[in-house]
Image (cartoon, rainbow, N blue to C red):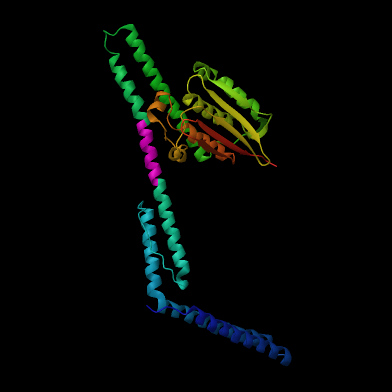
Amino acid sequence: MRKIDIKRFAHHTINLIGIISSIIIGFFIIYKVFNININYFIMTLNIISCFLGIAIYLVVVLIIHKDGGHLSQRFKMIFNAIDKIGNGDFNVSIESNGSRHDHLMSELSVKVNNMAKQLSSMESMRQDFVSNVSHEIQSPLTSIRGFAALLQNENLSYEEKKSYLEIIETETKRLSKLSDNLLKLSSLDCGTKELQIETYDLDKQLKNVILSLEPQWSKKNIEFEIECPHTIVNADKELMSEVWINLLNNGIKFTPYGSKIYVTIENHDSNIEVTIKDSGVGVNEEEQKRIFERFYMVDKSRKRELGGNGLGLAITKKIVNLHGGSIRVESEINKGASFIVSIQIEK
């Protein structure tokens, strides 16, 4: 298929513009020197404009005639791909043409391909999310149904009945916590919960959260080493309290009996960093990449025994991001894990 010589086309276009401009300037000089009636001058300009429009139209028609089949085919491919995407089929790929005169079409093809890949990734995440929610709900419901059926046995002892009722209560709390976390994520994702920014003492907040969790860490004889200088922040106090509760609860769960948890605040020029370090088994490099994903659990069996559902760290990351901050994990196997929250300082 014949390609258009862009340089030659541009050269002829510039020459055409030069000729038209010369004619217009010439008529203007004649109008001034000979004092021609303004109506004749305007009529002449209109005639020239008309011919210029016809010339441009003919050039466009020429381009379409020479390359129209190629452009039409490209547009058809793109429109078909968009139709597929609109119908939920994200498995599309448009070949991009590297020729110089087809640069815009190639760029459009790349954009459509990228959009399809991103939508496909989002669809996979949605399906995984639905699958995980279904599994997390089904597991406690199965336990509740099973032990409720066992309670119908009239020959059960008091101790057995009490044990079954305690299991039902535990599973019910687990369902309630899952529901609560899903509602929190939903409100944070949809932006229905507005940030209530206030100025408060961050160091005092961290110490109060640690004290509120005393029943958990004192049961495991865990000690805290706290290095938190006086620090003022502007943030949503309630939501940030949720961040520290999630991170400290996580640290307490995975810190062995009689070990330590370290909590520090470091003030920098542009940000404040809060580090919560446990003394657990650590997190390997691959798991660090996914640890903030929803429903992801490093040790699924143990986390469920401890009451986890894989949403705590996802909620934590969402809250920190809403504040314009960031969170990361640093860890080595058998050397614990450090969660570092960075909060920007408003100047």
Give the camera-side residue of 30 and 94.
Answer: 94
Residue at figure coordinates x 47%, y 22% from the top left: 256
Please state the total of marks drawn on the protein image: 0
Tell me if 319 is positioned left or right of 285 in this view: right
Instruction: Inspect the magenta stretch and tell me whether residue 199 lies in it.
Output: no
Vertical side of 218 occupied by 154: above or below: above
Q: Quadrant of the C terminus?
A: top right
The residue that appears at 28% across and 17% down in the rendered structure is 149
**Residue 194 in sight in this render:** no
- Where does residue 229 sit, x and y in percent of width and height? 68, 29
State which quarter of the image contains the N terminus. bottom left
Side (left or right) of 302 relative to 315: left
Visible residue check, residue 171: yes
Overall secondary structure of the magenta section: helix
Which range is magenta?
123-135
> Relative to residue 77, is residue 217 drawn left or right?
right
Residue 329, compared with residue 102, is above or below; it is above
How far across and down, in percent of the image, does residue 230 sit? 69, 29
Q: In the rendering, at what x and y percent does residue 83 appear?
A: 37, 58
Q: Look at 43% across and 58% down and name the residue there.
A: 112
Q: Nearer the viewer, residue 201 or 43?
A: 201
**Left or right: where 102 falls relative to 89:** right
The residue positioned 41% from the left and 65% from the top of the image is 96
Q: Which image quadrant for residue 307?
A: top left
Q: Quadrant of residue 237?
A: top right
Residue farthest along the bottom direction in this orientation: 34
**Relative to 261, residue 321 above or below:** below
Residue 66 location in percent, x, y?
Answer: 41, 79
